[in-house]
Amino acid sequence: AQTVTQSQPEMSVQEAETVTLSCTYDTSENNYYLFWYKQPPSRQMILVIRQEAYKQQNATENRFSVNFQKAAKSFSLKISDSQLGDTAMYFCAFIAGTYKYIFGTGTRLKVLA
Amino acid sequence: SQTIHQWPATLVQPVGSPLSLECTVEGTSNPNLYWYRQAAGRGLQLLFYSVGIGQISSEVPQNLSASRPQDRQFILSSKKLLLSDSGFYLCACSHGTGAYEQYFGPGTRLTVT
């Protein structure tokens, strides 16, 4: 079965600091896609970053970057220069050749002023 | 890019009453459509998904049903609400098979009293 695990229910970081959110997954597929979504207090789900498994290069979007370790089935999200607006729930998600996306249970991140 | 509309935004209904939540998508055609439920502070539970008009896949046997009467319309229904149906309901869309991100609507907060 395909699973996504986020082992950090809650984290906090000081404004302007860097934080890394962990995500591991399990699949027997070779081609798949990984995503990080952000859900702020408004509860609107927003795509943060996307990674194709066949690409060795880690995806980057401004202050957000990932550390994709395919062999270890690890997909962590690094947020640099944290801002108060980064306070949100962050979900790791995965899909492999189907219509069903598998989501982790989320990490609640609080950025402290 | 696509825009997903959901209504109502907030709903309070008594136990045993019917339910109809609507989701419509603009700016795209032939989307895959999804209904998720999210309990407070929790992850996403996939309820239904649809890859075409009239095609519905149910993930969790429960008190709810879904229909897709038009290409860009997805409806979540119940004949008799239960207290356990309370939650935050998200509609999402994607395209293709397992290669693209999902986009989410703003959600409907349902409270069953």
Image: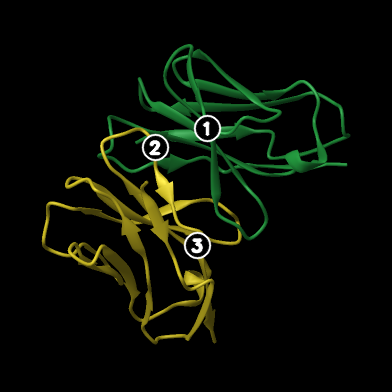
Chain colours: A yellow, B green
How far apart in space, not on screen, are marks 3 and 2 (Cα)? 18 Å
Please tell me whether residue A14 is drawn above or below residue A47 in the rendered image.
below
The x and y percentages for residue B62 are: 67, 30
At x 42%, y 62%, the residue is A5
Classify mark 2: residues with Cα within 10 Å, few (<14), some (14-19) or many (20+): some
Q: Which label sits on residue B59?
A: 1
- Chain identifier of the residue bearing label 2 in the image: A
Classify mark 1: residues with Cα within 10 Å, few (<14), some (14-19) or many (20+): few
Q: Which residue is mark 3?
A: A106
How far apart in space, not on screen, are marks 1 and 2 (Cα)? 10 Å
**Label 1–label 2 contact, CB within 8 A:** yes
Which of the 4 image quarters holds residue B30?
top left
Classify mark 3: residues with Cα within 10 Å, few (<14), some (14-19) or many (20+): many
Q: Which residue is mark 2?
A: A100
On whether disc 1 and disc 3 are found on a single subunit, the reply is no
Q: Is residue A39 rendered to the left or right of residue B101?
A: right
How far apart in space, not on screen, are marks 1 and 3 (Cα)? 20 Å
